[in-house]
Image: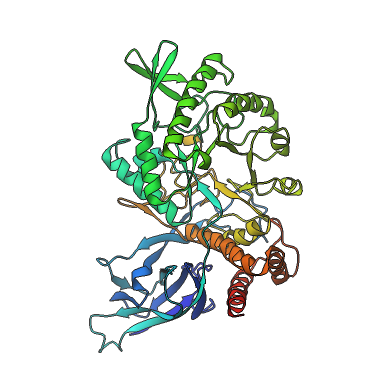
Amino acid sequence: MNIQLIQIPPLQKFRPTDSFFDHAELREQTVLRGERFCYQVCIRSNIRQSVTVSLESELAPYCKLYLVKNVVMDVPARTEALHGEDYISLEPGLMPDLLLPVGEQNRELFLSDAPTVFWVRADIPQELAAGDYTIRLRLTTADAQSSGGDAESVMQLHVLPAQMPEQQLIYTRWLYIDCIAVQHHVEIFSEQHWQLIDQYIAAAVDVGINMVLVPVHTPPLDVAVGATRPCVQLVDIEKCGENYRFGFERLHRFLAICRKNGVRYYEIAHLFSQWGAKCAANILVTENGKSSYLFGWHTPANDPAYTDFLKQYLTAICGELQKEGISRQTYFHISDEPSLEAIDSYRSAAEIIRPLIGECRTLDALSDYAFYEKGLVECPATSIDHIQVFLDHHVPDQWLYYCCFPESVYANSFLAMPLRRTRMLGFLMYKYSIRGFLHWGFNFYNSILSRYPINPYLTTSADGAFPSGDPFIVYPGQDAALPSMRGETMYAAIQDMDLCLALERRIGRNAVVQMIDEEAGYDIRFDRYPKNDRYLTELHAKMVQRIAQEDAI
């Protein structure tokens, strides 16, 4: 058939300029029940020809097949002093990331001399019988006999009796439902919009996201001072004299979509402006039949009228959360990424909010320990390059985030980075008992400060503002969100955490941490860890083997 195939691990990125056989081949894998296993099949044809692709396996009902597509990496990094760092390339160009589903209706492909790469995913059911399984990817031409027969790749999968435990990490990437409407050219809160919201939330849950940002009012995020984003306020608000009336029909519909898709945790949109809580969030209010932003950039954070509104607003919202039975799983944001210079305004805002939210908790992305030390936030989500001081103080329920930076040393998920820099997070977060992970961009399809929408297929950097890949991990499809290699890799990192937990139940936490460090040859930290794929794959294999050994005793 004049076709070459090679199976490679999911951590490797096969670029158009790569030599075909520079990558290590993967032929078999041992997994737990309930584990997701992914690998890639690279294909090169010596002649231009049409083929039909088929996936044959006892596991076929649990498998998905994708074409790996290159995307535009317009800003690999913003810092020129990164040569020698762990990057694939610092030159703009193409990078594989988009995963395009291959369905039953589009299994005929045209092969040329350019490589074609498939991403194969198998979601092993918890109830699957332990044993050996085969996944066969077969390519067939219209005349297989005259062209030398079918070409195929074969993966041997060994499924152990042990089960992967339930995900423990709370994981959020902020969902922007205004970006959904703009990218898909639908009216906000039209039936089409609701269907798309459903699809995007399903796509988020599919890669391990179990917390969703709830826009009770339009989140005051990534917007220029004095500007507004398209209004996606879920709560209807009417002012009647000194009192307010609230309508929650859209809120309950949104929560129902979340619940249907398996969301377990919720975060309420920030109540004050970003970077310091200086102003009120933009709140749309109807009064005497006219709707306007009664509160917003023109409203100081400590305005008595806003404080009075918040008392009524949050009391009503918390009542609805109680009806939904999710108060204990809900977190309120005050202001995103406040600087130390803004600690006084943040304190004032926190003193307003915290008495009003009952059994809910507060959560914010911030990096100065003083905010937690002074009791201003219950759950600090700390930047990966500032987290050590929080770890030194043994903060319970510590969260982690990265956002637009750092570009050197630390784990991240920029397009120019090898996927191991994302996957490494799993073992690090387990070792340091990280409770939650937050990232700002699930589907941010705007320029910086949301000045205008961008085309995510032409720029992956918010039009030059951030390193490519930072603003989103899904791509807008015709009527759904399309996944990415980076999103799947983060899911694999979360599974590494859960694998550690499974082993911990058998040999204890100290022994698991010892395995993590011994495989590296030193005490790993967020700023010091092995920069090779082998560490991750071999540590995973050793943990799986140890689980099998312990269960055989």
Horizontal and vertical percent for residue 98? 42, 59
**Which residue sits at x=37%, y=80%?**
46
Q: Position of residue 465 (x, y in %)?
A: 54, 43
Q: Residue 131: which quarter of the image?
A: bottom left
Count all numbered tags in the image, as a single digit: 0
Judge whether residue 4 can be spotted in this image: no
* 514 and 48: which is toward the camera: 514
Q: Whole-percent x and y of residue 233?
A: 40, 31
Residue 19: x %, y % from top left:
50, 75
**Most foreground residue, 207 or 225:** 207
Q: Is residue 546 above or below residue 216?
A: below
Residue 389 vs 156, above or below: the answer is above
Q: Is residue 342 left or right of residue 128?
A: right
Q: Quadrant of residue 65?
A: bottom left
Q: Residue at x 38, y 69 (%)?
A: 63
In the image, what residue occupies the spot 52% across and 17% down? 308
Q: Residue at 27% across / 40% down in the picture?
A: 191
Q: Quadrant of the N terminus?
A: bottom left
